[in-house]
Amino acid sequence: MKRLTEKNLIAMVKNLQLPLPEGFVGIGDDAAVLPKKNAPWVISQDMLVEGTHFRWDWSEPQAVGYKAAAVNLSDMAAMGAIPEAALTSLAIPKDMSMEVIADLYQALTAALGEFGVPIVGGDTVGTHGRFVIDVTILGVPTVFGPVLRQGAQVGDRLMMTGTIGASRGGLALLQAGIPWPGRDADEKTLLTAHLRPVPRVAIGQKAAEYVHAMTDISDGLAVEVGELTLGADIWMEKLPVWDATRRVAGRLGQDVDSWVAFGGEDYELLMAVPPERVEAMKALGQAVGLVEVGMVTDRSEIRWIKAGRPVRIDGREVAFDHFLRN
Amino acid sequence: MKRLTEKNLIAMVKNLQLPLPEGFVGIGDDAAVLPKKNAPWVISQDMLVEGTHFRWDWSEPQAVGYKAAAVNLSDMAAMGAIPEAALTSLAIPKDMSMEVIADLYQALTAALGEFGVPIVGGDTVGTHGRFVIDVTILGVPTVFGPVLRQGAQVGDRLMMTGTIGASRGGLALLQAGIPWPGRDADEKTLLTAHLRPVPRVAIGQKAAEYVHAMTDISDGLAVEVGELTLGADIWMEKLPVWDATRRVAGRLGQDVDSWVAFGGEDYELLMAVPPERVEAMKALGQAVGLVEVGMVTDRSEIRWIKAGRPVRIDGREVAFDHFLRN
């Protein structure tokens, strides 16, 4: 493998590139050019920093590259948008090898490529500090328009895809010194949920026709419900918590409810759905599991309901602080 | 000033925000939404890393914020594009103060605001490493389309705006332990050129009607000429080198020609212009100084011509390596 230089990096990046659609100008000019019909763009940018979002002793380079793609694709999913192009900037420590960067970048390219998303630009720079990867992703809304966080109405049902708390369980395992693949199937399941979250792109696009508001669950359920509405009841028994998550929480002596409420990085979708459309959404979401977990209320508080009564969930200490986690 | 937390950061960022154009969705959702008529987007991303692109003992926070905007605006200029929106991601060391970030961000916002460019999204994360700022900028081409690096033809004249070598001179002063504003007017001029490069946005847009190819001079003239064409003659006597640059080079015992050929970060525009359009371009570029500095040839080498003869310029050791500079 070649020496780590900017020229070799750009050559590698170009080599891994998807063929560009007609009329696109990609890497190699001062900027990329994306021809676009009569449609708005949806655009977001998410940065992952070594030591804050991941650690090299916990994550393979491939997992970091994959996750950088996944968290950005998840933002497109949360807007009900169709991802179309990405830009990637890397700050690379000088002692990093080209092999590691190539592994990471290949996984990133593959994860974006699964959705037909080419990398059309970006930057590669050296750093005397930590590794940083910043991805910008652009997409277009469906004919139903972009789905914002605003728009939830009192009486709307809260629905979510997939599962909750598993990613926080995976993080708890890593923090306990148990790396992937863990010591049994339960641990492997949770570690995978943390290291390889699945962006819910297809169901996000379908939801655009049906929902009032939507977001992805990156900062924990409590935070994200609060992004959609001032008031909500969350029905604890309805939350899609895996048995594996409960078992691992028990084994580690941690509170599964706090993982569920305050853990982060599930990258599932949370939607405010008008009651009459709940069944239709359930049918659409069968492949990923889409369940009703609560409703929007006119109170100005978020209540966690268990056995018909509001309960208090402690556990802000497990809250995902993506500002300075590790 | 408030404590450094993500919430306080986002509040500060929102506070500094320009009013958004009709139909835009900015900071606070999963992604920004930019409504767009029937036009392509031009988009680029440039990352500045502490210790690689700047040092806190050399640059005020305001200068770093300004430069992060300027280098990205310069990419829009180099495409002949009209900048329309930006996203910014910051990786912030935990010992940084909110004051410093606010100063930096305010300068960034102001520099973008001068061109009517709102910040519509991005990310703020903590880091245990160095400060990083990554800016994505989006624009639209003029009716003449985006101007690429490809397209230069044999016989085209090479023209450039402003001045060359001054930024490298400013860097040489900083490296010699002479901070802004320097010890005299010459030093102040060069330090300003390095710390506060002016993006050539207006002339870049005008050039779109006239030129075959264009780029900005970020990595040094030798590199950038090589981006436009395999073969060129550069007329050394015609290069717009300030007397201040020559004097400071003399004072520091450095070779001004090597600054000119291999120094970087001038952020001037370099254009390949058909001969019959040179006079028109000169007239258009009067305000910023736009001069003929060479021509595209059918040789496959770049020749530096002095007193009518090719000369060899040594000085790769001053070459700007934006991969790991300091």
Image: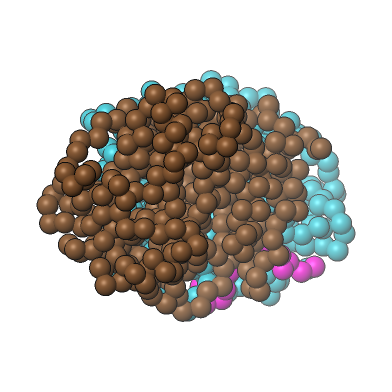
Chain colours: A brown, B cyan
Image x and y of residue B177, in percent: 53, 20
Can residue A84 be seen in the rendering of this structure? yes
Among all residues in the image, which is located at the extreme left?
Answer: A299
Residue A96 location, quadrant: top right
Magenta stretch prevailing secondary structure: loop
Instruction: Work out whether B101 lies above or below A122.
Output: above
Instruction: Work out whether A152 lies above or below B235.
Output: below
| Image side of residue A186 versus residue A14, left or right | left
| Image side of residue B26 versus residue A137, left or right | left
Query: What residue is drawn where x is 32% and y is 36%?
Result: A257
Give whichever of B268, A307 is nearer the camera: A307
Number of labels in the image equals: 0
Residue B166 location, quadrant: top right
Give whichever of B178, B7 is nearer the camera: B7
Q: Quadrant of the N terminus of chain B?
A: top left
Query: What residue is drawn where x is 69% and y is 48%?
Result: A106
Query: What residue is drawn where x is 72% and y is 53%?
Result: A16
Image x and y of residue B7, in percent: 28, 39
Looking at the rendering, the stretch of residues picked out in magenta corresponds to: B142-154
Image x and y of residue A217, in percent: 38, 49
Instruction: Work out whether B86 lies above or below B165.
Output: below
Image x and y of residue A201, in percent: 49, 61
Magenta stretch holds residue A199:
no
Query: What residue is drawn where x is 56% and y is 76%?
Result: B144
Magenta stretch holds residue B149:
yes
Q: Quadrant of the C terminus of chain B?
A: top right
Can residue B60 be seen in the rendering of this structure? no
